[in-house]
């Protein structure tokens, strides 16, 4: 047995335990963190939509003001032309003014039509905005509740979590960077996030495939770090190492 390797194997096993514990704490939070995040995104999008619709509403109101001013102006001109029409000297002048009058009347009609459409759109936008504001309020209330719930859970595990992180840092310092990085690489690539597994009943504790005898000896001897040939996890000996060694000799 290489004492240095044996210590590192123990530390690897402790690191795995610590990480599994941290994972369990995160799992306890369930989908709450994702729900809070999704609500925040929804609220942000809703607020942007409301801003856009409010801009449309402002433009519509400006259109109403400008159309009203246009109609007022056109009606004034209409009155002027009507007054002029009373004082014409010949048919040619009369016809010219009549034509102007008709054009102005048409302009007024078109402006009134646009005004009517704008009023309808304003009503529609106001009703949409009312619905959007109500939805935003309810989502904001949901977020407050969910955030409170999440804070309670986070606070409950805060001390435990920080102790685990501290322990983790101590272990990593003892392991050294190359071994730690190898551990992390394996952990990220395996489905259950277990990079260090014991041999259980002669099989890898990660993938359950039987370990060849020669490799098993290597694990029990603790002279080097042995990886499962099938899944690549680091193997450690937990069960009856003495018997196994006796069996080997
Ligand atoms: Zn395996």
Image (tube, rainbow, N blue to C red):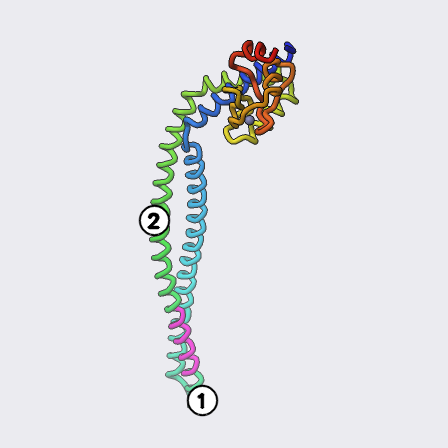
Q: Quadrant of residue 41?
A: top left
* Residues shaded magenta: 98-111
* Residue 95 highlighted magenta (yes or no): no
Q: Is mark 2 within 8 Å of ligand 1?
A: no
Look at the numbered disc 2 and give the secondary structure of its residue: helix
Please say whether residue 173 is visible from this viewpoint.
no
Q: Where is residue 78 in the image (x, y as percent from the top left)?
A: 39, 75
| Residue at 38% over, 65% down | 115
Residue closest to the eye, 185 or 219:
219
Residue 121, above or below 30: below
* Quadrant showing the C terminus: top right
- Within the displayed image, which quadrant is ligand 1 positioned in? top right
Q: Where is residue 216 in the image (x, y as percent from the top left)?
A: 59, 19
Residue 245 is labelled as none
Q: In which quarter of the image is residue 91?
A: bottom left
What is the C-alpha distance between the residues marked 2 and 1? 59 Å
Overall secondary structure of the magenta section: helix
* Quadrant showing the N terminus: top right
| Residue at 61% over, 20% down | 215
Pointer 2: residues within 10 angstroms few (<14), some, or many (20+)? few
Name, please, the residue furthest toward the bottom: 91
Q: Name the residue under label 2.
A: 131
Marks 2 and 1 in Cβ contact (< 8 Å)? no
Residue closest to the eye, 200 or 122:
200
Q: In which quarter of the image is residue 89?
A: bottom left
Please say whether residue 4 is visible from this viewpoint.
yes
Q: Which of marks 2 and 1 is in front?
A: 2
Q: Mark 1 points at which residue?
A: 92
Asked if residue 16 lies left or right of residue 222, the reply is: left
| Residue at 62% over, 25% down | 182
Q: Position of residue 113 (x, y in %)?
A: 37, 69
């Amino acid at each position: 047995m290489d004492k240095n390797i044996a210590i590192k194997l123990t530390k690897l096993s402790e690191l795995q335990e610590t990480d599994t514990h941290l994972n369990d704490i995160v799992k306890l939070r369930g989908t709450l963190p994702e729900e809070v995040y999704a609500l925040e995104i929804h609220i942000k999008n809703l607020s942007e939509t409301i801003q856009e619709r409010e801009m449309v509403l402002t433009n519509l109101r400006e259109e109403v003001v400008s159309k009203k001013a246009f109609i007022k102006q056109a009606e004034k001109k209409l009155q002027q032309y009507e007054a002029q029409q009373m004082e014409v000297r010949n048919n040619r002048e009369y016809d010219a003014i009549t034509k102007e009058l008709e054009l102005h009347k048409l302009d007024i009609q078109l402006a009134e039509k646009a005004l009517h459409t704008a009023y309808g759109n304003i009503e529609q936008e106001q009703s949409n905005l009312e619905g959007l504001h109500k939805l935003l309020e309810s989502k904001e209330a949901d977020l407050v509740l969910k955030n409170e719930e999440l804070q309670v859970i986070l606070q409950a595990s805060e001390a435990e979590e920080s102790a685990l992180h501290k322990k983790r840092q101590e272990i990593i310092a003892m392991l050294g960077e190359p071994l730690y990085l190898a551990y992390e690489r394996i952990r990220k690539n395996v489905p259950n996030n277990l990079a260090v597994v014991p041999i259980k009943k002669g099989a890898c504790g990660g993938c359950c495939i039987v370990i060849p005898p020669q490799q098993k000896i290597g694990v029990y001897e603790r002279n080097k770090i042995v990886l499962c040939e099938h899944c690549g996890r680091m193997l450690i000996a937990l069960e009856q190492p003495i018997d196994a060694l006796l069996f080997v000799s």
